[in-house]
Image (tube, helix red, strand yellow):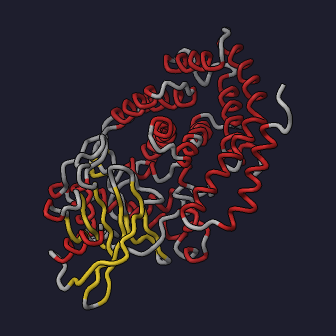
Amino acid sequence: MQDEPTPIELIKAVADFLRNEITPAIKGHNAFKLRVGINALDLVTRQLKLADDGDAAEHIRLKQLLGADGSLIELNRALSDKIAKGEVDLQTPGLTEHLWQTTMDKVAVDQPNYASYKRELGEK
Amino acid sequence: MIEQQLRRCVASWYPGATGVTGAAKLSGGASQETWSFDIVHAGGESGAILRRAPPGYGASPGRAAGLDAEATLMQLAHDAGLPSPRVMHVLTPADELGTGFIMQRIEGETIARKILRDEEFARARPLLARQLGKVVAGIHGLPAAKLPKLREMTATREIADLEREYRSFGWPRPVFELALRWLRARDPGPSQEITLVHGDFRHGNLIIGADGVRAVLDWELAHFGDPMEDLGWICVSSWRFGEIDKPVGGFGSREDLFAGYEETGRKVDPDRVMFWEVMGTLRWGIMCCGMMQRFRQGPDHSMERAMIGRRSSETEIDLLRLLAPRGK
């Protein structure tokens, strides 16, 4: 067992330092890069918080949709293959809901401020 | 060092040029660079842009039209009265600057967030969609006989290219599979009319001023194909920068874009435009995945590329909004 603070706490402390103390002192192209870097740290924090639950739920849905077991990537390959071959499509019960939920969970990590995502959440 | 080379080059074709000043690199990968500089002459200074492949980087990558073709297209657009910089000089071997061209620098803004939010552009924003419709119609109407040699694309070929690229990543994306199926099932076949297509007509490649559009840049992806492709591409949700209810670049409506286009006597096919919007959304998603590959394989481990890789999911939500809208 690793000791505390947790990775989430460590990354957040670094991101907050960069955001609050360093950002005002940096100009030009490096200011842009710094912002990208802070965004990356924030993304990692969200992934550490959210991905386990999202992945577990996705795994359950995939097993149900495909009637098969395997790792997340194996099941995603199998589903991709079936869509490519036309064996499942938007008429297949559960597929639309699965793709929506999986995508919403991904964007929640990648870009929770993306306008289409906020619209689908009913926030904007 | 580049100022010295530029000075020598400019002296050979700009009457009365006495020097070159303020050379600054605006962007550049390994194979292509853009520089801004000023030509000093008796009457003052003239802003110029150098777009070049440095010596040793002659050939352009797969889809690129090539710098010579870009120069020809820009000059043709300028001559036709379209908002386009004047090409001042096409590089020759004697210039020792590589291949490329020098064009007039046009002042204005290319950054979408500023164009969409700053007060300076408040008056221009409601005019842009219609203006751009007219401009892109002008591009599609450029005289075929004068155009350089370019690749010819069809929807069928574009779908195949996108699929090949997506498969090369070896990373399963069920939403992209769905989009590929959707596109193949609705492939409208070859366009009745084949025209010049700009290929990257969107924010970043448009110089905007307080008065509206001032220049169309970056003809790197120009090709022959279905003119509706350009209209679909500029409507892709990723270029709306938060203003998702204004499909044209976050500033305008499809109706205004189409009205501007049809003002010139050309016709819009809205179904085809929508088809190309879906294609464009998938294309941007696959381009984001490509950025992730280049981040991982490239030598520079650029943070920006890595983060663009994480933007592919935004195209998945936009594809679902287009192909499987909820609550309907």
Residue B183 placed where, x, y %? 45, 32
| Residue at the top extreme of this rendering | A68
Position of residue B247 in the picture relative to residue A16 (left or right): left
| Residue at the right extreme of this rendering | A4
| Residue at the bottom extreme of this rendering | B43
Residue A99 placed where, x, y %? 65, 28
Quadrant in the picture for the N terminus of chain A = top right
Would you identify the image quadrant in which residue A30 lies? bottom right
Q: Relative to A64, is B36 above or below?
A: below
Q: Relative to A45, is B8 above or below?
A: below
Would you identify the image quadrant in which residue B215 lies? bottom left
Residue at left 31%, top 89%? B44
Q: How many marks?
A: 0
Position of residue B115 in the picture relative to residue A58 (left or right): left
Residue B318 in view (yes/no): no
Position of residue B236 in the picture relative to residue A25 (left or right): left
Would you identify the image quadrant in which residue A121 lies? top right
Position of residue A13 in the picture relative to residue B112 (left or right): right
Task: Compare residues B145 and A24 and report the one nearer the observer.
Answer: A24
Residue B237 placed where, x, y %? 56, 49
Residue B94 placed where, x, y %? 13, 63
Residue at left 51%, top 41%? B288
Task: Compare residues B133 and A74 and report the one nearer the observer.
Answer: A74
Residue at left 60%, top 42%? B314
Task: Compare residues B104 and B31 and report the one nearer the observer.
Answer: B31
Residue at left 24%, top 63%? B101
Residue B231 in view (yes/no): yes
